[in-house]
Image (cartoon, helix red, strand yellow):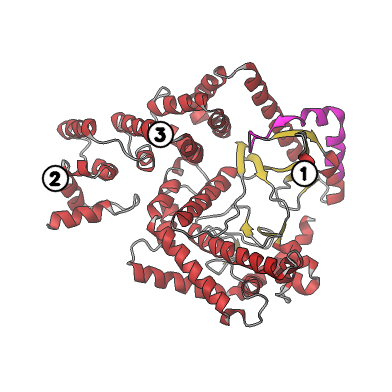
Amino acid sequence: ENDNNLLDTILNKDSLAELTEQEKNVLWKRRDDCLNYPHSLPKLLQAVNWSNKADILEMYCLLFKWPLIKPMQAMELLSSVYADLEVRKFACKSLEKYMKDEEIEYYLLQLVQALKNEPYCDNSLCRFLLKRAIKNQRIGFILFWSLRSEITKPKYKFKFGLLLEAFCRSLNKAQLKSVIKQIEVVEKLSNLAHEIKSNPSNLTLIRSSFLSDTLLKPENRLNLSNFISPLNRSILLGLLEATKCKILASAKRPLLLSWTNEIKYCEFYDKNFQLIFKKGDDLRQDMLTIQALRLMDILWKNEGLDLKMLIYDCFSTGYKTGFIQVIKNSMTLFKIQMKGGMKSTYQIDTLQLYKWIAAHNTDSGQLDKAIELFTRSCAGFCVATFILGIADRHPDNIMVNRHGQIFHIDFGHFLGHFKKKYGIKRERVPFVLTEDFTRVIAKGSVNSSESAEFKRFKNLCELAYMTIRKYSHLIINLFTMMLSSDMTELQSIEDILFLRKTLAIDEPYDKALEFFRNQFNEAYRRSFTTKIDWMCHALNKKNLI
C-alpha cells in the first residue's frame, strides 16, 4: 500500500521534479505495473540504470510492449534528457499515430529544437517532420522558416541544411518560386532595417524620409510586392504602399509596412494588409510566449472560462528578424493617455482609458459589452503575465482595441528577468493592475476597488490562475523543450524554475490560492510604482521620436 501511494505521488510530479533514489527503486520494482499507466514512461526511464546492460535490455523489452503515448508525453521523450535511440524512436511512433497536423503546426517550435538533440542527421524525428511537411504545405513552410532561423549556428548548419534541401527538393516550381520570393523580401527588408538603425541621424523625419525614398524606387517596390505572407499562407500581399509605410518609435526601429489587397471585393472587408518587420530581437522568444498564451486560452476555454484573449501572430524568419501581425483598430495605452493631454500622459488623470473606450462604444449596451470584454481580457493577461514573469510592461507594450479588449505586446523579457535601472528593479509589482484598468472595470467609478465589478474581476483572476495551475506540467514542458534554443533568458533549468514558483506547484490548493491572492493584493496596492515608471517612460519617450 505504501508503494502504491508513493507510485501515485511520483507520477503526479512535474517534469522538473527530481526523483529520489527511493522513488527510482519503487518505479523500477513496479516497472511491469507501470505498463497500466502509459504516461509513467518518462519517469520510469529516469529510474533505469543506463550503465547496466541487463537493465537496458529489460527496459527495451518493456518498451516493445508499451502502449503508444499522447503527443505531449511523447514530445517530453525528445528532450536532451532522453538520449537513447530506441526511446526516441518510440516517441516518434507515438507522434506518427496520434499527432494531428494542427498539433504539429502548434508545437513545431519545440519539435525543431528537439532535432538538435538527435545524434545523427538521419533520424526518426527528421523523417516524421519531413513526411508531414511534404503532405501539408502549411506545415512545410513553417518548418522551412523555423529551420532558416536556426541555420546560422555552425553547430546545426549541416544537419538543418540537409533537411532544408530535402524539403526544397519536394517542392514544385510554383512553390519553390514562392519560397525564393519570400527569401528575397526578407533579405531586402533586413538590409533596409539595418541601414535605418545605423543611420547617424537621430531625427525621425530624416529616417522616415529615407524609408519613403527607398521604398518608392521602382525596383524596390517591384521586389517587395506580390508575395505570400510569411505569417499566413492564405494571404497574398499585393503592391507595397510606400507612402503608408513608417518607422515605429521603438529602440529597434521596426518597420510598419502596408500592402494592397488584390482579392476581389476586398473593399468590403480589408482594403490593405499591414505587417511589422523587426530586426534586432530574437522573435523566437515572442513566439514561445505567444504559444504559452494560446495554450492558456485553450485550457481556460476547455474549462468553460472564456477570457476573450486577443493574441497576435509573430514569426521568426532568420537570426533576430521576423514579422509581427498588426491588430487593426487598436492603440497603445500610451497613445490613448496622450489623447487626454498632459494630466493623463503623466499619470494624473486615471479616467482617460475609460473615456476612450466609451467614445468608441456610445450606445449603453455597447459600452457594457466593451467593459465586459475589457474585464475578461484584463483578467487573462494579468494572470498570464504573472505566471510567465513577463517584464518591461510600459504603456507602449499594452494595447486596447475599440471593442474594449486589452492585450500585451513585445515579449522581449520573460521568466522574471525584470529590467533594472541603477541596480534597482524597474518593475516592483507581480503584474500590471493600475487604477486606469480598475476604473474601466468599475464603469468609471472613483472608488473602483470597492465596487462589485472589481470583486468579480478578482474572482475571475483567481479562477483563471487555479485553472492553469491544474495543467502546470503542460506550460513547464513547453519551456523545457526550448532549453536547446540558446535564448538569452532561457538558458537553464533554473530559468524554468521561475514557473514552479509562480504556479506554487509544491503547495496544496488552499495555500496556492492564498499565494495568488497575496500577489493580486500587492499588484493593486503597489500600483503607484507602476505609475511612476510610466511617468518616467513618458518623459523618456521623446528620445525615441
For the magenta stretch, what is the residue range?
Answer: 209-234
Residue placed most toward the observer, 18 or 343: 343
- How many labels were placed on the picture? 3
Work out whether 197 lies above or below 506.
Answer: above
Q: Amino acid at mark 3?
A: Asn
Q: Which residue is mark 2?
A: 29
Taking the spot 54% from the left edge, 71% from the top edge, the residue there is: 457
Mark 3 vs 2: CB contact within 8 A: no
Residue placed most toward the observer, 3 or 370: 370
Ranked by sequence position, the earlier of labels 3 and 1 is 3
| Image coordinates for residue 393, horizontal then vertical, percent | 62, 61
Per the image, label 1 sits on a secondary structure element best described as helix
Ranked by sequence position, the earlier of labels 2 and 1 is 2
Q: Residues within 10 Å of mark 1 (few under 14, many from 20)?
A: few
| Image coordinates for residue 76, horizontal then vertical, percent | 36, 41
In this rendering, position of residue 145 left or right of residue 237: left
Q: Give yes or no for residue 223 being in the magenta stretch.
A: yes
| Image coordinates for residue 58, horizontal then vertical, percent | 17, 33
Q: CA distance from mark 3 to mark 2?
A: 29 Å
Work out whether 254 lies above or below 219.
Answer: below
Q: Which residue is mark 3?
A: 117
Quadrant location of the C terminus in the rendered image? bottom right
Mark 3 vs 1: CB contact within 8 A: no
Taking the spot 46% from the left edge, 74% from the top edge, the residue there is: 518
Q: CA distance from mark 3 to mark 1?
A: 49 Å
Q: Which mark is residue 268?
A: 1
Which of the two marks, 2 or 1, is nearer to us in this view?
A: 1
Q: Amino acid at mark 1?
A: Phe
Q: Residues within 10 Å of mark 3 (few under 14, many from 20)?
A: some
Per the image, label 3 sits on a secondary structure element best described as loop
